[in-house]
Image: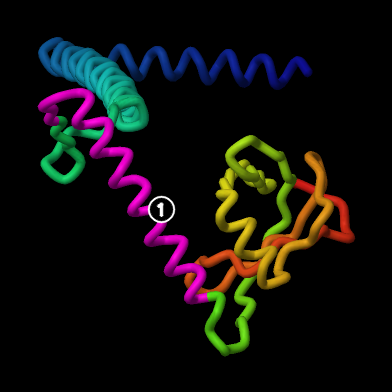
Amino acid sequence: MQPDNESKHDLDALYAKRKSQHKSPASLKKQILLSHQQSLSWSKVFNRMTYMATAACTLLLFGVFMLQTQSPQPVTPDNLVYLHSLDTQLQSSTNQTQRLATNQKYVDAYRSYLNQEQTFALHHSKQAKLLLTPSGWKLTTCDDQALLVAQSLINELTRVQQIELGLNSGDVVDIAFAQNGIVLGIQSSPQPMICS
């Protein structure tokens, strides 16, 4: 162990002697130290600016996303509704007359559709829970879509024997639809309604 310590000590002494013989100019030493300090300061500033820019962009993107999800639909001429009124009694009686005429038109069209001598093509069916209301039936599907069935449609489906009699509130029913969305029939479902 002793020889290692001595050789190390001799090597250090030799290095110190050689270093003292060949000194670098002070200006070179100063220039190297100065350039090293400047490069460190610029890299720190650049790193800080990069972090701040990244944080600002992240906050900006988050703000834009929040504005997009919370902003209401803008009013455009396509979805703007103008209300005009003349006389409230005249208007209400006119509206009621128009509503009755429209309802009768749809009932007649549906009756003529059901009276056609063609086979009903079942396109799809859905399960729903039945709720009896004074104005007809309310059918609620698993995805919380409500289908209001008017009494006139119930009467028409009963007439053509496409609706099961004796249904009660809370019953699970199968609704049969044609390809164009018309209700073809309502029957009690043998399977329970399982919503996922």
93 inside magenta stretch? yes
Q: In the image, what residue type sits under mark 1?
A: Asn
Q: Can you give x and y, in whole percent of width and height, for residue 39 in the image?
A: 21, 21
Q: Quadrant of the N terminus?
A: top right
Mark 1 secondary-structure assignment = helix
Q: Can you give x and y, in whole percent of width and height, for residue 119 in the image?
A: 62, 87
Give the answer, above or below, for where 142 lies relative to 85: below
Residue tagged 1: 103
Task: Classify residue 70 by image quadrant.
Answer: top left
Q: Can you give x and y, in whole percent of width and height, for residue 147 in the image?
A: 58, 48
User: Relative to 97, is 132 on the left or the right?
Assistant: right
Task: Classify residue 188 by image quadrant.
Answer: bottom right
- Which residue is pictured at 67% across the width and 67% down the height? 159
Closer to us: 9 or 133: 133
Q: Can you give x and y, in whole percent of width and height, for residue 29 in the image?
A: 19, 14
- Which residue is pictured at 73% across the width and 63% down the height? 163
193 inside magenta stretch? no
**Residue 132 visible to an observer of this rendering:** yes
Give the answer, above or below, for where 76 lies relative to 5: below
Extent of the magenta region: 84-113
User: Relative to 194, is 107 on the left or the right?
Assistant: left
Task: Classify residue 4 by image quadrant.
Answer: top right
